[in-house]
Image (cartoon, rainbow, N blue to C red):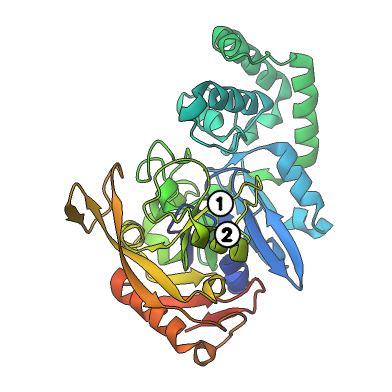
């Protein structure tokens, strides 16, 4: 049985908490795309863990954790994360030999391109994700399995640097010293090679086990179906998780979509229900809305039904987990974006571009006292009405409701 957890907004919805909550039910947890530009924060027994490459199942002492072929791996970050956990994690971690590697020149290119874009910058994390995926598509990338033959890999990279010499000079990126690169690759091999394997074969051989797929980022950042060009560089939707792991489509059992009780995004790009005034700042403060990876303040706004329905449909969601309901405690009223208007015309669908789109709101009465609730009956009546309103408007059951940072601060309906 293979289940999938996917973000329904612009990321940062709290996927890590839900994965951690349900990971005890699974034998294998798989990360299928993205790189260390993503961050999952998990709180266990009062201790906060920030995961960027390791699957969120690492906190389950029995689960095997798989980094799939769709992930781009920055080895120094992965090595650092591994060392933050007990030594047993090495015995429960598999890295796809087909996963592509982020090297330092990718990070330098990313930073240079953002700098040259100026006011048109995408707002990337400058972690080298885009350039690594670009090399993958250009068939010029480096895969983790290539660490088995360092000399051959060094020859390939030498040719790469020579071929791209003019481009790198234009960007102001210094061509790395090949001897320094070789030392780095040898170190990566020493630290990681025993964990590198054909994970597609492993998943097929163990397909009868209970498996959980987790993505990074979220639907509205999908390279094809998100708010292009202000998106990430991989397919973040449900079908992308299958491509990024090698799991056959007919083996997918259940899809759980994750959404906050409001909406946030990091970086540039359209955001119809953004609240840039006092209420947006209040959401940011109460929700501690700062990026796990970069620390950047997140843009905050109200729940967007149009975007949520779009994401639920494209991912074939069976259920939704609504996160951080407690952040809205104390608001006299809460708004919900139930539609869009453009040039005086009502839009009830999510268009390919959001130029000149304005939100249409419905206002609901606020509540107080949802924080820490662990049963449906413990929620204030207006909080229940808010959840039921979102279910009605999105057409999807809300099964999980998060009311705090701890694992146990979750209502399961």
User: Residue, x 83% and y 56% (percent of image)?
Assistant: 87
Mark 1 = which residue? 298
Tell me if mark 1 has few (under 14), some (14-19) or many (20+) residues whose alpha carbon lies within 10 angstroms of its own.
some
Tell me if mark 2 has few (under 14), some (14-19) or many (20+) residues whose alpha carbon lies within 10 angstroms of its own.
some
Callouts 2 and 1 close, C-beta under 8 Å: yes
Of residues 338 and 402, which is closer to you in this image?
Answer: 338
Q: Which mark is residue 89?
A: none
Check the image and report above or below for 272 versus 194: below
Extreme-left residue of the structure: 345
The percent position of residue 37, horizontal first and vertical second, equals: 60, 43
Check the image and report above or below for 205 versus 109: below
Of residues 134 and 25, which is closer to you in this image?
Answer: 134
The percent position of residue 267, horizontal first and vertical second, equals: 52, 42
Mark 2 = which residue? 284
Check the image and report above or below for 370 versus 378: above
Check the image and report above or below for 59 versus 99: below
User: Residue, x 36% and y 52% (percent of image)?
Assistant: 272
User: Residue, x 66% and y 52% (percent of image)?
Assistant: 54
385 sits to left or right of 232:
left
The percent position of residue 307, horizontal first and vertical second, equals: 34, 57
Q: Is residue 251 visible?
A: yes
354 sits to left or right of 346:
right
Q: Is residue 194 visible?
A: no
Of residues 335 and 122, which is closer to you in this image?
Answer: 335
Residue at mark 2 to residue at mark 1: CA–CA distance: 7 Å
């Amino acid at each position: 049985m293979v289940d999938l957890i996917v973000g329904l907004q612009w990321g940062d919805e709290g996927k890590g908490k839900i994965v951690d909550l349900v990971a005890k039910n699974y034998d294998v947890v798989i990360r299928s795309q993205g790189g260390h530009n993503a961050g999952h924060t998990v709180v266990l027994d009062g201790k906060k863990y920030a995961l960027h490459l390791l699957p969120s199942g690492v906190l389950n002492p029995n689960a095997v954790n798989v980094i799939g072929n769709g992930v781009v791996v920055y080895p120094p970050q992965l090595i650092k994360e591994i060392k933050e956990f007990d030594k047993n994690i090495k015995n429960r971690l598999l890295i796809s030999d087909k996963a592509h590697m982020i090297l330092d020149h990718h990070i330098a290119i990313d930073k240079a391109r953002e700098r040259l874009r100026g006011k048109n910058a995408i707002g990337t994390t400058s972690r080298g994700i885009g350039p690594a995926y670009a090399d993958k598509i250009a068939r010029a990338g480096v895969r983790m399995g290539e660490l088995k033959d360092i000399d051959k890999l060094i020859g390939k990279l030498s040719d790469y640097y020579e071929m791209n010499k003019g481009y790198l000079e234009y960007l102001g990126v210094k061509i790395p010293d090949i001897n320094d690169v070789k030392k780095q690759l040898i170190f990566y091999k020493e630290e990681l090679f025993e964990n590198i394997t054909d994970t597609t074969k492993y998943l097929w051989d163990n397909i009868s086990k209970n498996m959980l797929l987790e993505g990074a980022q979220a639907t509205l950042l999908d390279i094809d179906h998100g708010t292009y060009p202000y998106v990430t560089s991989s397919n973040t939707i449900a079908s992308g998780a299958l491509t990024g792991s090698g799991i056959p489509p007919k083996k997918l059992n259940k899809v759980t979509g994750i959404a906050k009780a409001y909406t946030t995004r990091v970086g540039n790009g359209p955001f119809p229900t953004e609240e840039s005034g006092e209420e947006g700042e209040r959401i940011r403060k109460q929700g501690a809305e700062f990026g796990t990876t970069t620390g950047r303040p997140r843009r905050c706004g109200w729940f967007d039904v149009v975007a949520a329905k779009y994401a639920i449909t494209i991912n074939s969601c069976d259920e939704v987990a609504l996160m951080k309901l407690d952040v809205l405690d104390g608001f006299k009223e809460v708004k919900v974006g139930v539609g869009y208007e453009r040039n005086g015309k009502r839009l009830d669908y999510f268009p390919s571009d959001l130029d000149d789109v304005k939100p249409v709101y419905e206002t609901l009465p606020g509540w107080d006292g949802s924080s820490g609730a662990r049963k449906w009956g413990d929620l204030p009546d207006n909080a229940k009405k808010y959840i039921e309103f979102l279910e009605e408007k999105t057409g999807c059951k809300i099964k999980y409701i998060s009311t705090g940072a701890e694992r146990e601060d979750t209502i399961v309906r």
